[in-house]
Amino acid sequence: MNAQKENFLLAVEGLTVSFDGFKAVDDLSFYLDPKEIRVIIGPNGAGKTTVLDLICGKTRATAGSIRFGGKELTKMKEHQIVHAGVGRKFQNPSVFEDLTVFENLEVSYSQGHTVMGALAFKRDAAVVEAVESIAETIFLSDQLNEPAGLLSHGQKQWLEIGMLLIQKPDLLMLDEPVAGMSVAERKKTAELLRVITRDHTVLVIEHDMQFVGDIADRVTVMHQGKVLSEGSIEHVKQDPKVIEVYLGH
Amino acid sequence: MKTNSPLQWLTSREGIYYLLLALLLVVVLPLLLDPFRLNMVGKYLTYAFAAIGLVMCWGKAGILSLGQGVFFGLGGYCMAMFLKLEASTPEATKNQSTPGIPDFMDWNQITELPGFWQPFHSFSFTLIAVIAVPVLLAFIIGVAMFKRRVGGVYFAIITQAIAAILTILIIGQQGLTGGVNGITDLQTLMGWNIRTDMAKTTLYFVCVGLLFLCLLVARHVQNAKLGRILVAMRDQENRVRFSGYDVASFKVFVFCLAAGLAGIGGALFTLQVGFMSPSFVGIVPSIEMVVFCALGGRYSLLGGVYGALLVNAAKSGFSESFPELWPYAMGALFIGVVLAFPNGLAGLYERYIMPLEKRLPVIGKYLDKDKPAPQAPPVVSDQLSAEKP
Amino acid sequence: MFADYSSTELMSIFAMQGFAGLSLFSVFVLMAMGLAIIFGQMGVINMAHGEFMILGAYTTYLTSQFFQNLMPELFAASFFFAMVLAFLVSGALGAFVEWAMVRHLYRRPLDTLLATWGLSLILQQAYRSIFGAREVGVDLPDWMMGAFNVTDFVQLPINGLFVMVIALSIALAVYLLMYRSGWGKKVRAVVQNRPMAEAVGINTAGVDRATFALGCGIAGVAGSAFTMIGSTGPSSGQAYIVDTFLVVVFGGAQSLVGTIISAFGISQAQSTMEFFLSGSMAKVLTLLVVVGILMLRPEGLMALKVRR
Amino acid sequence: MKTPKHSLPSRPRRRLLAGLLALPAVLALSTPSFAAPPTSEVNTSGLAVTEDTVKVGILHSITGTMAISEIGSVQAEKLAIEQINAQGGVLGRQIEYVQEDGASDWPTFAEKARKLLRQDDVAAIFGCWTSASRKAVLPVIEQFNGMLYYPTFYEGLEQSPNVIYTGQEATQQILAGIDWAVKEKGAKTFYLLGSDYIWPRTSNKIARIHIEKKGLKVVGEEYYPLGHTQFNSVINKIKLRKPDVIFASVVGGSNVAFYKQMKAAGVDLTEEDPLLLTISVTEDEIRGIGGENVEGVYASMKYFQSLDNPNNKEFVAAFKERWGDDMVIGDVTQAAYLGPWLWKAAVEKAGSFDVDKIREASPGIEFKKAPEGYVRIHENHHLWSKTRIGVAQTNGQYKVVHETKDLMEPDPFPEGYK
């Protein structure tokens, strides 16, 4: 078992969290291979977002373990988890509206993360280059000096993804990255994700089955805090338990 | 940070604002005012230190501290202890039962200088303590609170309670602290009589000099990446956290910075006014400092300075002309600022005066060449509220 | 420490200290109930809360003067009348303040702190101009003075008991109103999700105004009750404000039960310590313990655990 | 410390000097004033004196928490000034006053004192109330060589050449009070209770030493923060220790809470078991506490509104006429009233408004029209005065039950009580 675990990038085992007795995630286990694209789907309230919260340390687990590249995440602080290589995008775009796009990306740049480091941080050529290259990836090269508050909803989503990319994480977690996007933006986002997935492991929560089908290696279906089904998109679509949950009520 | 040389900076829009303030404080006021009024301005300026701290802590980082008076007071007490020891030579106090200790200790049957007073015989220790003591307390409070993610309203109320505790403690331990009277009758600093007009004017200029030093330090922090992280933290704390920052340590830093600045202000206050009393440690001065900052513009360092100057000048002016009306005026000022121009004077300036500047043929064109950095966000809203623990 | 006293004396001490703690408890509950609504439920940091209390106290003073001079035969009952009036007067001022000031600041809770602080300055000076700077004494009807002698040593003051009864009735009334009435549901709906509450047809502006007025009205009743045990002067309200906020925060801002538990805890701790230490040190220690516990448990004693 | 030109005589010589100085003072006062002397003669130090006016300052809190206590002093000082003006003023000059608000804030007091002395060049300041405000003002007054008339009973331990203390210092109030309680009421045990600041603490220190010197016992000593309103615990302690006398120096709003809670806890002070002796509750405070709550409380002070003498009757009538029938007058209010009169006497004796000359002239000055009877300035700048014991009535007045036979000597640095 142990030997097997080492091969996974992320191993979630027996993960449980309860809020005042309500188990939002209940004895959940799943494993991610390196460079895998995994999509979690499930009806509202299934505990999908909570899983991401648990992995990135926003919520503390009641029981269970999350091992990531050999480190136990449940005992680590949020910023340490980020430094371990986990990046997380929130459901509602959360960018720094008072800062420019450039500054948003610069803040996320993986240097000057301590107080003293941030005080001594210089905007050198390497920084500018990194920011500009990411900006190009996320289609925001022309908006570099605009305050992020003026961006459209979709652009903010991209910016937030860009802010994750500049951290160079091993695992990217995206919570409904295309929610609220126009069709055109949706297409561009799918394109963006395909670029990203070339060299990152990605964990996505998504509702749009078309989109899921486009990107997912494997799909995990959650229901009432537990794994209902897991496998390829075709596999889970056929699973009677999944059909029951989605159509049965 | 885009400017490379100091000279370039001084001719930029921001630099000109700093120059104007310097002109006002160094040239205009000393020429216009007699030593008595100038000393009063000096006193107001000591509050500006606390206000600058609040701009960093509250305006930039969104942490409202109602304990700024505590740090101001601690800095002031450190300086007062040194001056009191200097004033309490065995000769000057030969009528006491125990000569050589401060008079209030003698009144309280204390026969030996308490241990924590001893190091204050040294001036260099005192200078360090003026900053170190407030910073240390801020560090302890900050670590305890921010690591536990106490924020927003809760933080404000807890700091207020700490101000209350410290006041009661200082008043209660009057044998050690001078009690409600405070530490009074301070006369000389290293043999130099600080009560003369000459000394007061000198101290005024020292105060102005230090103020600019502190302004530049604060400005440096604001313009470093650290400053952007503070603003980012105010608006999207979680995003900062999940961008790999230990948010708590940044908060601790800025809280300590504010405390240190307030401590310097307090020490200068003691020097210029000649005494220190627990009424500066309490709740009322702490809230007043927040008001200076709010009136000047909570996002603007210079706004904080102008806020401290104007509110205090108004307070003195009003209370001389209409003593029974000034609480109404002050109250109305608080409410008016908050309701009508939440970004304070700095916000008003940006909205109404800056557009006018452009119409001036020469200056307008000159100033237009560098784009004004937006100091304040368009809409003020306390993101803090979303962050209740 | 106890060696000098006989066991009956000791029993009496504990009984009396318990009672002292209870009367402090009722003071805290009275102060905190109004604030628990305004701060806990609405999120408004009302620094003028003490001044609303004192308004109630002055109303009581004027009412008792009125009865004494014009209807002395009804004086014995004047207090009840005064309390109702105090509620109405403070509530009316509260509604006005909400309309003129607070409603513009719901999105900026910290700014309510500054604005209401300004309000408190204005109110204090207004009291000073109207009633004079000196404290006023409110005469109590005779039946409220004196004490029940339980034993030779243990006396229960009637007005203390009376304050306690008022405190508990108010707590009960607030509880019923907030948790057992349709209106309370609306208030909580507005607090938790304003746009949604609006969408389902709740008049949020009306609910806000009424809630704020209710909180202020309760402060008025508290002030009315305090005339029996404390002083009524322009600045008397200031003395209560820090304690009150701590009680509410310590209890867990959104929980009324928490507020009551915290009032009980703090009052018992303080009165017990006062017996062994000097008054000043007891106060310092109590506040330190409260702040210490709040650092360990920032959400207060009775906070709901919610998914965030 | 700046050495004043006129140094105060050392202690042993004081008593002797007092007697000698009293004589010329009486003579000086009885000399009628002729036409106003020219300004150049009476003002050599740049004060705001013209041919027919002289400026003085009134510096009290009329806003903030201390306004409650200080308003009475302002009224008394204004009344005295108006009366002096009606009688033709000082050296033929009408007194004009500049009033400043200390706003219950000590640095503000210092700032305003500075303003009065430096901008308005006032010849004297009548003001301050709390010790803290006086301590804040003192360095300013000494630096600019002003003259302060300070009305409040206070803790002593101070003797500034630039201050005349028209209230009692601690020993005058306390020793007489305790002696009386021991002699007349047979008190053996005492419980000391006060607000937590220097005056109550110093007073209780003096009281404790005095009590213990007599071989009697202090069974408790307790302090509460200023503004404290919950006294049930200390009342329980008092019930338990069963002292003969509660010696109380609680101030401000706390008083109201304390006496109401005493009464509510079933302690009937009229039974005098225990007897409550206060040095802090004047008629002014009783208005806030309510007469029925303090009935039976004994106070040890130099003045009560009910004092039965022609001076006082005249004063009370004038005060009520000027400020309203519902006014009450407490110890400090009366002491504040003395200020302008004592200053006038000193100016006339010195024949000059100059502070240095007034200072020199002050010791030995008598004021026979004082409402409290007769006062005289000691060389230590405090007043010789009698101490009275009064018992509070439900109507808010004290009934005088005892009066010291002689004037009590002020002794701000009491040997053996440090």
Image (cartoon, rainbow, N blue to C red):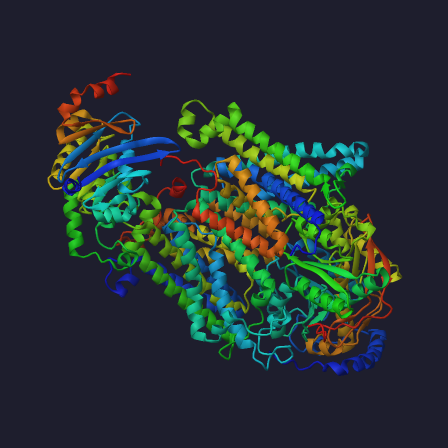
Q: Is residue A178 left or right of residue C104?
A: left
Q: Residue furthest top?
A: A248
Q: Residue furthest left?
A: A198
Q: Is residue A240 left or right of residue B65?
A: left
Residue at 33% x, 47% y is B233
Residue at 15% x, 35% y is A37
Residue B32 appears in the rendering:
no
Where residue B20 sits in the image (x, y, percent)? 38, 61
Task: Out of A158 and B15, give the one closest to the viewer.
Answer: A158
Where residue D35 sits in the image (x, y, percent)? 80, 73
Q: How many marks?
A: 0
Q: Which corner quadrant holds the C terminus of chain B?
A: top left
Quadrant position of residue D136: bottom right
Residue B338 appears in the rendering:
yes
Q: Which corner quadrant holds the N terminus of chain B?
A: bottom left
Where residue D408 sits in the image (x, y, percent)? 81, 70
Q: Is residue A40 left or right of residue B379?
A: left
Task: Out of C61 and B43, give the one closest to the viewer.
Answer: C61
Task: Out of D40 and C246, give the one closest to the viewer.
Answer: C246
Q: Is residue D377 left or right of residue C132?
A: right
Where residue D198 sits in the image (x, y, percent)? 64, 64
Q: Is residue C179 above or below residue C22?
A: above
Residue at 35% x, 36% y is C308
Quadrant position of residue C214: top right
Q: Is residue B160 above or below residue D382?
A: above
